[in-house]
Amino acid sequence: GGGARLRSVTVPVIAWYAATRVVLIAAVALAVVADLVGQGWPVTWPGVARDTWTALNSWDAAWMRDIAERGYFGLEDVDGDPGHWRSLAFFPLMPFAMKALSAATALPAAASGVIISVVAGASFAFAAAALAGRMGMLRRSMILASVLATTAPMAVVMLMPYTEALFLALAAWGL
């Protein structure tokens, strides 16, 4: 049945998902190196690692972290407007999950968010394989569907504390 077919792709789906995450992290690190070189800064492993982590926790990820740590109404003003005017645009599932994982593990909110996104992304990878199997595709096509779904443009957000990986996993498993 479908469960046996999905079990048959478990190892390849995990392996491909892990490999593509490594490639994505390497791509972000290379962009960081290029930026450091372009600005004339020295390139050191600790600096590249720190700046790569910072890049993965910037933009909307910073909002998720701030909401997880201080709540929607605990944010400072932004450009003269109350912080919650902007923070309320972010759906609460991700920051609440980050806060819960942080409370359970004592990890910082940013680390919790990355863990949630990576695990949710892996769940999405399995969901893509399951959907392909349900459509009658063979084992190889199930694996390919998983890889294609998790390496689409902007798949790097599945490494960041963004809502995308969590929503994709929930939506795909809902199908």
Image (tube, rainbow, N blue to C red):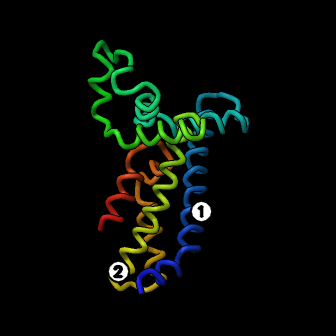
Decide: is 60 above or below 157: above
Q: Specify the label residue 136 is tagged with.
A: none
Which residue corresponds to mark 1?
19
Please, which residue is most extreme toward the front here?
104
Kindly identify the residue that appears in the image at 46 percent across and 68 percent down.
Answer: 126
Residue 21 x, y percent position in the rendering: 56, 56
Which residue corresponds to mark 2?
134
Q: Are marks 1 and 2 in contact (CB under 8 Å)?
A: no
Left or right relative to 61: residue 135: left
Spatial separation of the CA atoms under disc 1 and disc 2: 25 Å
| Secondary structure state at the residue bearing disc 1 | helix
Residue 52 x, y percent position in the rendering: 59, 39
Of the numbered discs 1 and 2, the one sitting upstream in the chain is: 1
What kind of residue is marked 1?
Ala
Decide: is 4 above or below 46: below
Kindly identify the residue that appears in the image at 36 percent across and 65 percent down.
Answer: 173
Q: Nearer the viewer, residue 32 or 2?
A: 2
What kind of residue is marked 2?
Arg
Tell me the quarter of the picture where residue 95 sits: top left
Tell me the quarter of the picture where residue 174 sits: bottom left
Q: Nearer the viewer, residue 31 or 48?
A: 48
Kindly identify the residue that appears in the image at 40 percent across and 69 percent down.
Answer: 128
Q: Nearer the viewer, residue 56 or 133?
A: 133
Quadrant of the snapshot with the N terminus:
bottom left
Classed neighbour count for the residue bearing mark 2: other residues with Cα under 10 Å, few (<14), some (14–19), many (≥20)? some
Kindly identify the residue that appears in the image at 33 percent across and 22 percent down.
Answer: 73
